[in-house]
Amino acid sequence: MIKPASVLIVTVAILLLIVPGFFSSHAGSMVSEQTYVEVTVQPGDTVWDLARHYGPEGADLRQTAYRIAQANDLEGYVIRPGQTLRIPGGRAK
């Protein structure tokens, strides 16, 4: 007959072998480094224009505009000429 203590020891040993490998293999996928492009606002620019011109290609324009507002602590989508904005995931032009 197998003793419960033996089963417990084997179970703990197996978990100690499996769990660290699981976390190390997923650590890189859980942390993604955000890239930004810095843009100086020109007269007549809007957040939507900047999202269209500098945002990630194929991204939803609404999400990109929202992320620009968040990344730059904008109140609404009000920007001013001369202001430097960070465009998350942006592409240089």
Image (spheres, rainbow, N blue to C red):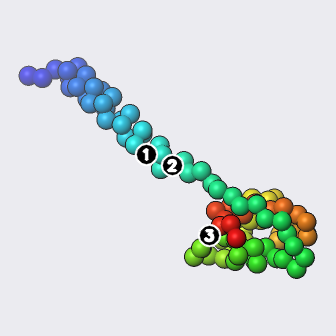
Type of the residue with mark 1: His
Between discs 2 and 3, the one toward the N terminus:
2
Question: Looking at the image, do the residues carrying marks 2 and 1 touch, with CB atoms under 8 Å apart?
Answer: yes
Type of the residue with mark 2: Met
In the rendered image, residue 62, in percent from the top left (x then y), is placed at 68, 75
Look at discs 3 and 1 and give the one toward the viewer.
3
Question: Looking at the image, do the residues carrying marks 2 and 3 touch, with CB atoms under 8 Å apart?
Answer: no
Type of the residue with mark 3: Pro
Q: Which mark is residue 56?
A: 3
In the rendered image, residue 74, in percent from the top left (x then y), is placed at 83, 63
Q: CA distance from mark 2 to mark 1?
A: 6 Å
Label 1 belongs to which residue?
Answer: 26
Q: Seen in the image, is 77 located left or right of residue 26?
A: right
Identity of the residue drawn at 38% across and 33% down = 20
Quarter of the figure with the N terminus:
top left
In the rendered image, residue 57, in percent from the top left (x then y), is placed at 59, 73
The quadrant where residue 24 appears: top left
Identity of the residue drawn at 84% across and 61% down = 84
